[in-house]
Image: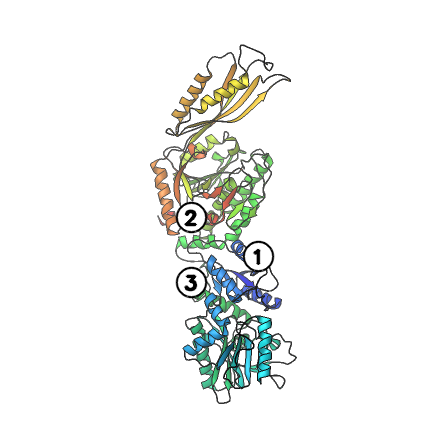
Amino acid sequence: MKVAVVYNRESRKVINLFGTANRETIALQTIKRITDALKKGGHQVTAFEGDKDLVDKLEHFMPRVVKGERPGMVFNVSYGIQGQARYTHVPSILEMVGIPYVASGPLAHSLALDKVVTKMILRQQGLPTPDFAVLTTPNAPLPDLTFPLIVKPKNEAVSFGLRVVNSEDELRQAARIIHDEYQQPVLVEQYIDGREINVGLLGNSPPEALPPVELHFGDQGPAIYTFEDKTRQSGRTISHTCPAPIGEDLCIQAQSLAIQAFTALGCFDCARVDMRLDHDGNLYILEVNSLPSLGEYGSYLIGAEHVGLDFTALVNRLVEAASARYFGTPEPPKFDRHPSDPPTRAFSFVTQHRDKLERRLEEWTNFSSLTDNPIGLREAVQRVGHMLCGLGMKSVREFTDEPATCAWQTTLGFGDGALFIGHLDVPVDGLIARQMFRREPEWLYGEGIGSSRAPLVMLEFALRALRSTRQLPKLPIGVLYYTDEGRDAPNSAEVIRAAASRAKRVFVLRPGNVGDSVVTQRRGQRKYRLRVEGESLRPGRAARKPEVLRWVWNKLEEFAHLTSRKQRLSVSAVDIQAEKLPMLLPHRVTATILVTFPDAKAADEVEQKMRAGLGKQRLRWELQEISNRPPMKERRGNLRLAKSLADVAEQWDIPLKRESSVWPSVAGLVPAKTACLCGIGPVARDLGTPHEAIQRISLVQRTLLLAEFLAKDIEK
C-alpha cells in the first residue's frame, strides 16, 4: 500500500500567516522512525508537510484508483500550522478529497482539543473527571474550588501553559500569562493529589486498551507532567512503570474508563487517556489525547511494548486498524498473488504495477521516433521486438516488411483471434519544440504520449498481466506495428490489410477520445495536391489570363461549398504555397485539399466535381491524389465487439462509450468480415500539439480493461 506520512514541522507554506501559530513540532527522528517502520511493513512510503500543497502532493503520489483497488493511506501525525483546532486541519482536507488516514477525524480532534467540552462530555457520560471552572478573563470571579488548582489553556495540547497554583495571586498571575500568551480562556481544574496513570488505546469498535503506565516524577518539581518534561527541558527524569502497580482491579477499571472516554469522543485507531489516581483509589480522567505522541520516550510506546508491539509493529498495527475501519479487513489490503479467478489475477497485476506503468511511459515518451527519424524508428522496432519476444511471442515474417511493418504472435498465432495494430512513429510536426514527459495529478504530458506511447505501454502491461497468470500462451494474439502513420500509412497499408483479414477481431491502438469513448466508425480521408501555373504578371497590368493566386483562391472557396453536414462530408484547403519572380505576381500556386467522407462513392463524386470546377482554363492545372485513407464503417461486428468490451468495463466501473470520429485511422483498412474497434488506448487530448496529454487514471483503466477482456476469452 502507498502510505504518506503527513506531519507539521517547518513549513509555513500558507496563503497568509494569520491566526494563532502552532507551537508543537514533531522530531525529525520520529518522522524517520515512522517511515522506516512502514517500509519494513512492505509499504511504499513518502513524507509530506501538511501545508497548502498537500493535495497536489498526495494526488501525485496516490492518484485516483479504479474500482476494487485500495487507495493509498495517510499516516497522520500533523499538528497543523496555525488557527483554531489545528489537529483537525489535515484530516478535514483528507475527508474532502477522499483519502483514508490513520487516527481520529476532525470531530474527535476538535472535541479532544477543547478541554472544557471534553470534560462536559465525560460528565454527561458519567465518567469521573476533576471539578473545573473557566475564566474568560484573568479578572473573572474565582471558581468555588479548593487550592491547589491546575490552570491550563482551554484549547492547547502538550501541557502548554500548565501550572499548579496554591493561592489567588498565583492563580491570577497564571491566568494573565495564559490569556496574554494564548489569547484564550483559562481552564481551572481541581488538583488531584496522587499518581499519574496513562492508558493507550489501539483499534476500533471497541479499541483495545494497552496496560496502564504510571509516570514517576521524582522529588523535584510538581508531580505533574509539564511541557518542559515532555520536551526534556525540565532537568528532571520522568520514569515509567508498565503495567502500573495499582492492582488488577484498578488496572481493569482504568482500561474500561479509557475505552469509554475514547468512544464518547468518537476517536478512531489510537488515543491516550491521561488520569490521576488519588490516595483513596479513585480514578479521574484528565484529558484525551486524540493524537498520542509516538516520540521515543512516550507512555503510548511503553504500553505497546509491554504487549509485544515494538515501534515497527505498532506503526504497522495502526495502519491495519485504519484499514479494517475503512475497508472492513482485519489486515492491510494485500493482493493475492495466486487467486483462483483469472480476472482478479489480471486486476492484481495491473494495480500493483501502476508506478511501473508510468515509468515505462516516461521512458517511451522521452525516446524520439518521429515519422522522419529512421534511426529512432529502427531502434523503436528493436525495443518493441525485444519486449514482445520476452513475453514469449514470435516474429511473423509474413507480415514483417521492415522498416514499414513488423509483426509478432503467440504460439497459437492470431488466426481466428485478436490482432492489435499500432504505430511506432510519432506524427508530430518537426517544427514543434520537443516536449519531454511531465506529470500532473490528472494528466500526463509529452511528445506523442497519446497518439503512440500510451497505447503501446497499455498493450505491454495488459500482455504482461496475462503472462503473469500464465494465460498469454493460451490466447491467439497478434501484434503489428507500423512506422508511417505520419505519412498516412502508404507503405504499410497492404500489409495491414492482409494481416487484418486473417484475424477475427482487430483492435487499433489509437487513443480514446475525451469523454471515455472508443470508436466504432471513422470517416475516410483523401488529400489532393492542386498545382496551377500561369504567366508571371506585373502588378496592376491588364492581362487576358487571370492572376494565378486569385484564381486558385476563388476555386478553393468554391470547393469549400461542397461540404455537406447531411452527407457527413467536408472539403477544406489545409495548405497553400505560391512561387513568384521578383517584382512579379505569383505564377505557380500549390494547394493541399483535404476531403473527409463516409464512403468512397461520396469521395469519388467530390473529386469529379472539383475537376469539373477547375474546367478548361488557360491556366495549366493538375489535381493529384496524394493520400487515400478508407473509412471505418460501423458494422454489426464492430458494435458487438464494443458491447462485449463495455460489459467488462461495467464490471469494474470503467467509463466507456462508443462514438464516431471525423479523423481516419488504419481501422479503415480492416475488411468488412472482421470486427474492429479503434481508439482503445488511454483517453487523450491535444494530439500533435505541445500540450498533448493522456488522462492519468485512464492509463490504468484501459490497461485493466484490455487485460480483463482478453482474460474472459479463457473462460469462454
- The residue that mark 3 highlights is 327
Mark 1, secondary structure of its residue: loop
Query: Which region is colored magenta?
Result: 140-147
Sequence-first disc among 1 and 3: 1
**Which residue is painted at 60% across and 64% down in the image?**
9
Q: Residues within 10 Å of mark 3 (few under 14, many from 20)?
A: some
Q: CA distance from mark 1 to mark 3?
A: 35 Å
Q: Is residue 44 in the magenta section?
A: no
User: Which residue of the protein is positioned furthest toward the right in this rendering?
Assistant: 235
In the picture shown, does residue 392 fall above or below 183?
above
Residue that carries the numbered disc 1 in the rendered image: 15
Percent across and percent down for residue 459 are 47, 45
Is disc 1 in contact with disc 3, using a CB cutoff of under 8 Å?
no
- Label 2 or label 1, whichever lies nearer to me, is 1
Check disc 2 and give the amino acid type.
Leu
Visible in this render: residue 56?
yes
